[in-house]
Every structure is written in C-alpha cells, then in structure tokens.
Amino acid sequence: MTYRELLAKDSFWMKDTLDIPIVLSSRIRLARNIADNPFPHVMSHDDAEKIEAQISGVLDGFTAEGEKLVYIPLKMLIPVEKKVLIEKHLVSPGFNETEYARGLALSESHKIAVMVNEEDHLRIQVLMPGNSLREAWHLAGLVDDHLEAHLDIAYKEKLGYLTTCPTNVGTGLRVSVMVHLPALVLTNQVQQVLGALTSLGLAVRGLYGEGSRPFGNIFQISNQVTLGKSEEDTLTHLDAVTRQLMEREVQMREVIRKESPLIVEDKVWRARGTLENVRILETEEIYSLLSEDRLGIDMGILSRVSAGFVSVLINSMQGCLQYNLNKQLDAYHINAERANFVRGIYHHKMSENVN
Amino acid sequence: MTYRELLAKDSFWMKDTLDIPIVLSSRIRLARNIADNPFPHVMSHDDAEKIEAQISGVLDGFTAEGEKLVYIPLKMLIPVEKKVLIEKHLVSPGFNETEYARGLALSESHKIAVMVNEEDHLRIQVLMPGNSLREAWHLAGLVDDHLEAHLDIAYKEKLGYLTTCPTNVGTGLRVSVMVHLPALVLTNQVQQVLGALTSLGLAVRGLYGEGSRPFGNIFQISNQVTLGKSEEDTLTHLDAVTRQLMEREVQMREVIRKESPLIVEDKVWRARGTLENVRILETEEIYSLLSEDRLGIDMGILSRVSAGFVSVLINSMQGCLQYNLNKQLDAYHINAERANFVRGIYHHKMSENVN
C-alpha cells in the first residue's frame, strides 16, 4: 500500500456505529519519553533525528492484533497530506509546525497512530468507532508494552511516566470520547449537562480538540487528571460518564418526539432537502446539516444514506476533499466541490431503507 | 355554481404566464358613484341599502365577453370567505370592516370584480394574468358602459368622474401591474430602479397594496394621477414603464447567469429542496422560497412544477388554506398545513420537464 492509498482511505474510527450512534468514537492516548534525553521542546535538530531513528526502528513493521505499523517521516509528506492527517485526527493540529525530525507510525486501518517528537517523544494513540474505550485501551497497551520492551522509557517510582507538560505526568493517559448530542442542544440542556462534567475533572472540547468550537453538536469529553489516579479509575470514570450522557441524550430525543415531533421533523427534513440540493456549502454549515440529518436517521424520520455521518463530515474537510479529488482548490471551489460531494452521497440513499 | 365553488376556484389572474413571467398580473380599477347620493363615508344605513339594491339589480346576471356577474352581498359571507376574497385580490383589505350594506359582483373566472359601497359606490376591477393592461381596460370599459347606460353616474364636465377621495377624481382610473423582480433585488438595483418610478408619478407597493411590504420580490406599480391625464396616456405610460422593468430584470438575470451562476444555482436549488421537504412553513418564508424557485424555473435551472407561482402563493395564505381544507386552524397548524400543501405540489413536478 502506498502512502497515498494509506492516507486516502477512511480511518476505521470514522465508521458508522449503527445502533444509536451517540458515541461516535473512543480514543486512548499515552504520552511517553525516552529516558536521559532532552524533551522535544528543548532538543536540538540532532537530538530529534537520533530519537526519531531510534523510535521508528522499533515501530516500523510492528504488528499488534493484525494492525501493522508503517513509519512515515513528516518531511516525506506534502502539505495536503499533512492536512488530511490532522482532519482524520491522526496527528495533532500543531504537529506540522516544526523543522525538527518528526513522524508518524500508522496502522493500516488507522486504529493505531504513534506520533514521534510531538510534545513528547512518543504519543501513542488508538482511535476506535463507537463506545469502545476498553478495546482501545487494550490495543494501546500492546503498543506500549512493545515500546517498553525495546526502549528505555522515562519513569519514576513516585511520579509515574515523565512528560514534557506536567499535566500529563503520572499515567500519561488521556482517554476521550466524541459524542453527538443534538437533542441536548435542541432542548437547551447541553450547557448545564456538560458544565457539570468540568467539576468532575473532565474537559469538554470541540471536534478538533483544544480551542476548537463544538460545531455540529459534537463534543469531545476527556480526563484532565493523570497524576494520582490509576489508569483503571480513569477509564471507569469516563465510561460511566459517557453512559450517562448517552442515556440523557436518548431521553431528550424521546421528549422531543413526544412534545414537538413536527418541529424536529421540519428541522431534519429541511437539512435533508438542503443536502440533496446544495451547490455551495461552507464548513460550518455542513456540520449542522449533517448533525440534523443524522438525528433524523437516528429517530427513524429519515432514510439512511450510503455513507456514515463521521465519514461524510471528515471527507468534506478542505484537505480530505482536495486529496480525494487530487486537485488544489481555492475557497470558492472548495465550497462548490463540498456541495458536489454531499449531493453525490445524498442522491445515493440506501434503497432498502428509503421510505 | 355555489358561492363556495365560485370562491374556492383559482382566479384567472393567478394563472401562470409561461414565457418569462416577470409581469404576474395587470389590473384596471375604475371608481364611480351614483349622482345625487351621499358618498359611502357619509351615507346612512338606509342610503347604503338603497344604493346596493339599485346597483346589484344592474350588475347581477350582466355578461361581458362571456363573463357573467353574480352579486354576493357581503353579509352572506362567513369570515373565512371574506378572507379568501381579500387574498385573491377580489376585494380590498378594508372591505369587510363595516356594518353597512356592501357587496361584490364577481364573474365566474374572477376577471371582473365590482365592489359596491366600498370607498366609492362602485369600484370596477378587472384583473388579468401577465402583461395585459389593454385587454383588462377593454373589459372594464364594457362594465363601465353597462353601468352608465343604467345608472346616473356622478360626472362633471371640467373635473370628470366624482369620487370620495380627491386623489381619484378625474378618470377614477387606477392601472397597476404586479411584477416579480428577483434579479433586480439580488443585484441590489431594485431600490434605485423603483425609486425612480416615484418621481414619474407612479406608486410602488407590496403584494397586498397600500402599506403591505414587498415580500417575495413582488411589487405592485400603479399610477397616482387621475386628474388632468387621459385614460389613454395613463395606460400608455404604465405599459412603457412595465416593459422597461421587464427588460431590466431580464438583463440582470443574464448578468447573474454569466457572473455568478453557482450562487444563483445554489440559491434556487436550496429553495427547491426546502419546498420539497418542509414540515412547518410561515407566510414570510413561503414568499421567498417560491420567488427563488420561480427564478430557478425561469432561468431553466429547475424543472417546472404542476402549479404556478402565484397560484401556489395565494393558495398558501391563511384564508385560502383553511377554505380549501374546509377546516379552522390555529397558527401552528396553518404553518404545518401550508408545508403539506407545498410539499404536495413539489412532489408532483411535471414529468415532461423534469431534468
């Protein structure tokens, strides 16, 4: 498989989970560093190259549960490819802004993505569709074990794993879920519900992490604390919160269905009508249209379409759109091609579900 | 034909004129009064009844070019029927607000509608689809001649016809056209173009005359002057202005087609998508959706639908909607039924034109 083929495919985590997909995806991230080496923010070009060489040697070709890693040095990639990696959540938005040796070990399905020389020497990420923190945790553990077996990972008895930013010291673990909460937004409950999470030590962010606005009723919920709390507790906590959020969202959908069915029907049918007919479509709008359309599908009002919510959303982003079309486009033509792309999807509704 | 059947049918003027229907309709109105009788604003109940009896006797059953008049006393009508008459432009909005004897002589196709005891004893109206001032003028003349032959119409050599309001003295003639100018609005030229008409002695109003806002890019243009200007000059003047407006609108459609085809395509396809899928629809919104859809049809972007622009617009009004459904509805259900009505139309696009 070429880089191009590898990057162009849909990430496994973008797959639709069909049974009330309120939890869109689950993510495990482990921060690790090589002992007795300067952290990335203070290392030299030579340090960076040395560490990259060392880590990539250990990662390239490693296979965990059939997921074989391929190491891709950042300098091999053209700008649009870097954009695709960000849009598919395989690297952090800031990953490209450097002259230092960096790279990514990516598995075929994109479930595993290990960034080298980002904020820490190693950022192990496992991303899965739906509510699957435990599975993701298991897979991340296999990668972590492999790295520990071949590298001298910085660790101190009393502190745990050492990391560049003190907020990651300890477990180095960030667990997060991406949730779609249109009914909580519609009923004006989302502020209150998500606000309460902050006091539980959880962070709430938009689709593209820190600083990104929560478009399309999509929110990322993650733990803040990595010190003095075990991995098991961190997982259990977020899992419990996620289940509560799901339950609340499902309840609110029932309330809407009973109390104002026509208002929600109007909203989702209008979204569907626009998705089927639009000729110019900006990023912000596609988020809300797809979110409303998805709510309509979930509530049994609209027929399914041939592609999933997250897949259409991510493939509508600037980078993915241009990469899939193999064309460089200005803003005007991006909005036109985005419209063409979604119209194509929405004109091929799944026949067995059309009502 | 019963009153119900007569009122429920589409007025002839609501018919679509297929070849670039920028001029939606043409209207002639003549104000007349019976000599030696008090004008309506100062007459007694007895005066009103006497005059109604006199006029209705002359009008009921009169036929001009196959258009047979039926006299309908206002008191015979229930509120929703009065609303239908207003919405179809067959009586003025203020016509129902009285205890005095009033009525309407209406022809089968609604081309001719003569109000009795409105602001003047007689308001002869002829309404036709498209740009047809001359035809309307001819038909109004036949009704006027018939009235003059059987009634003593108030007329003074130097002044002309006497009317309640001094602004109608002279010819008592108001000629008007209803024009659809979406391209002039889109290109921000409409203020300038229509502003210039005022200085030519013409008035610009919305769909429902004096005081009504110009929703849906529809404007009514009419003469202001009735004194010292012949009927022929009045007609010729408005006809010339109407042709200029049409030309300007057609030019602007060409400019849009050349300079920003995708922007107009997006606009009209979105309108079509909404009309096909909407579940709740308010009055203001249907104006703009139908206007955009109509522009799309005119420009060959959208396929035709089974019913015309004006017909769908008028039949979406509160009164017509309830009358056609034979149901009394609250505001919420009116918006739902309006949505059902347009969806019904837009799901039956004319097959020969679907592209």
Image (cartoon, coloured by chain):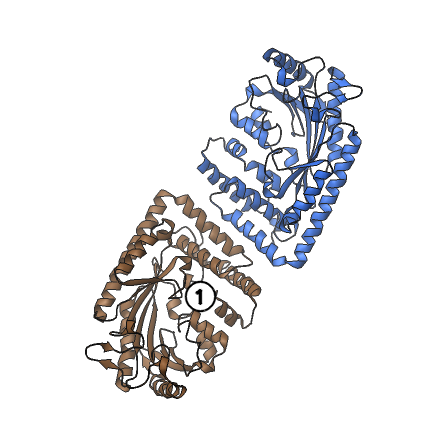
Chain colours: A brown, B blue
Image coordinates of residue A174 in percent, x first then y, are 30, 70
- On screen, residue A174 above or below B181: below
Q: Would you call the spot at circle 1 few (<14 residues within 10 Å), some (14-19), or many (20 or more)?
A: many
Is residue A84 rendered to the left or right of residue A240? right
Amino acid type, callout 1? Ile
Q: Which of the two residues, B126 or A214, is positioned nearer the viewer here?
A: A214
Q: Which of the two residues, B155 or A18, is positioned nearer the viewer here?
A: B155
Image coordinates of residue A153 in percent, x first then y, are 27, 83
Q: Taking the image as drawn, is residue A247 in sight?
A: yes
The residue sitting at the front extreme is A42
Q: Which of the two residues, A162 or B303, is positioned nearer the viewer here?
A: A162
Displayed quadrant of residue A140: bottom left
Q: Which quadrant of the figure contains the N terminus of chain B?
A: top right
Residue occupying image coordinates x 30% and y 81% = A33
Q: Which of the two residues, B249 or A304, is positioned nearer the viewer here?
A: B249
Residue occupying image coordinates x 54% and y 56% = A278
Displayed quadrant of residue A193: bottom left
Q: How many numbered circles does the render carry?
A: 1
- On screen, residue A77 above or below B246: below
- On screen, residue B340 above or below B120: below
Q: Chain of mark 1?
A: A
Q: Taking the image as drawn, is residue B308 in sight?
A: no
Image coordinates of residue B317 in percent, x first then y, are 54, 36
Q: Secondary structure at mark 1?
A: helix
Is residue B349 rendered to the left or right of residue B158? left
Residue occupying image coordinates x 70% and y 24% = B166
Is residue B324 rendered to the left or right of residue B128? left
Is residue B204 rendered to the left or right of residue A101? right
For disc 1, the marked residue is A314
